[in-house]
Image (cartoon, grey):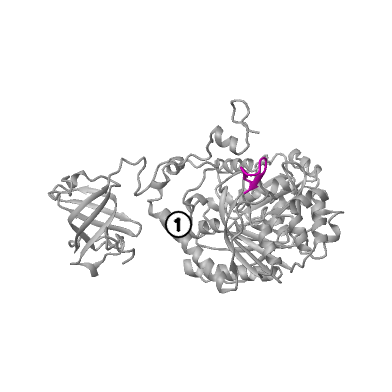
Amino acid sequence: MTGFETSYRNRTCGELGGKDVGHAVKVCGWVGRRRDHGGLIFIDLRDRYGITQIVIDPSLQFESGESARSIRLEYVIQIEGMVERRPEGMVNPSLPTGEIEVRAQRFRILSAALPTPFQIEGQIEASEDIRLRYRYLDLRRSDLQKNLILKCRLMKVTRDFLLSNGFVEIETPILTRRTPEGARDYVVPSRIHPGKFYALPQSPQLYKQLLMFAGMDRYFQIARCFRDEDLRADRQPEFTQIDVEMSFIDEEDVMSVTEMYFRELFSQLLGLDLKPPFPRMPYVAAMERYGTDRPDLRFGMEIIDFTRCFEETGFGIFRKALDNHGRIRGLVVRGKSGYSRKELDELEGEVRKAGAKGIVWVKGKVPGWVSSAGRHLTDGEIQAVLKVGDVGADDLVLLVAGADGVTSPALDHLRRTIGRRERWAKPTDFRFLWVVEPPLFEISVEDGRLGSVHHPFTSPGAGRSESLEKDPLSVSARAYDIVLNGVELGGGSIRINDRSLQERVLRVLGMSKDEYLDKFGFLLEALDYGAPPHGGIALGMDRIAMMISGAGSLREVIAFPKTTAAQGLMEGSPSEIGDRELEELHIKKLDNSSDFS
């Protein structure tokens, strides 16, 4: 038996087959489909394990005296009957139980159901908001159930692999103190300590480092993490992270263990044999060639720098970009010179969405070229473009002008859009990549201040610490991100294990001694008592599940996700709390508004 035998059932709806013909069974489930053929009623009875066809004679009565004709979709019913082979020509080869049916001898309704707000079986047409509002109904769908079961198996493989490689699973606090991790914290007011707050962890970063100081050597945790940030398809305010830390290691050690893990995972869950080591690409090369630090390697079409083709240009748009120290960069789309004007306009719209002002296109036709800026570009400039890009007669060139901060995201978005349009990115083709040596610091778009690319505890690249104060933006990090098919699955770094270097990094970030002692004094103190060389990685379990299952977003692999507005539509979160509770938490509501102090 697939499930546990209980007083309600002795078999599940997904396990019956020809071997069971002639056996009496007791099954329970939901009514997925109902067909009344006059003389007989046929029901597709569904549970987590599958579907079994039930045949009911409507002359039979429920224990309550009701007729089988009162059964409706999504009713929960119990059936007792005999397994029979389906009549010749009625076998359903697409269904694992398709060669049998259960002829009911007794049945009863365990729970009635109202008409559902959307169809459970088949193609669903309801909006995502409606599906999330009635998530318990949405989760009855087999594809979502398969995703959650796959995620359960993913957790088991993860634990088995790490435990077998000497890692110890250790829990770390959920209620902690605020520390800068790169996003806003969710905070929890303390009733016992008026005016003070806990923070929900963005990651267990400091705790796992302290565990290395404690001599635990190899730690892991399937950790719940919380970040108050703008959401999108691959983000949620609360998520699950595979958190790993190791002592006496360097970058290659962490990457090697991670590759072994993914090889085991893909073998166990998909039957695929990955071939480590995965390729490495410096951050600078990724940004130059693909415009992103998470490139999709399933197809080519790398970014090309065409700036030298227009050094003397009089074309105003290009001239302005060059005079402002920008560049002219673009893509060569092989064999696509036949794109219509409508298609090119659509691509220009995509570029504008990504922040660029537009594109200039060139078609390398024979005998002559054609361009959207033909009146403004010289033949010499176009010929230079055709040469630099090795452009053939059937190829299309798409050019974007501006600073790298404009052209990189625009061309990355354009490249992905064309890859999807042309179906060059096959979902069953898994291409891993390590992006290494990113910058240690970056300038925040929000406030223009210097911030950490990963976190303030990442070690500077070898031989680069002397530039920390003089030229911090030139300093690389001993960090690494693992990317799969254009999605960042996780990242990690070698940590700082020297107090003086850690304090220098915190000062470069603009913290005063009083400030960093207040926030990180416990970590700095721990560094004084012997800290081993250590590092680790954090992998997004939800993202891994999304990629392996082929789901379109994280919400398809999380049982009860939030919307892109960070709302739980089913339970109505976030919600207000009463004045009495606010008073207990020492929080005062201002006036009659929703503002608090």
User: Residue 229: x and y, percent?
Assistant: 62, 45
Number of marks: 1
Instruction: Say if residue 361 shows up in the picture.
Output: no
Q: Label 1 sits on what residue type?
A: Leu
User: Residue 65: x and y, percent?
Assistant: 15, 46
User: Residue 235: x and y, percent?
Assistant: 57, 49
Q: Any magenta on residue 584?
A: no
Task: Identify the residue under disc 1.
Answer: 148
Q: What's drawn in magenta, residue-wise?
A: 185-199
- Which of the 4 image quarters holds residue 231? top right
Q: Up-down: is 581 above or below 155?
A: above
User: Residue 434: x and y, percent?
Assistant: 65, 63
Answer with left or right where residue 547 lies relative to residue 363: left
- Which of the 4 image quarters holds residue 195? top right
Answer with left or right where residue 267 lies relative to residue 586: left
- Which of the 4 image quarters holds residue 531? bottom right
Instruction: Say if residue 195 shows up in the picture.
Output: yes
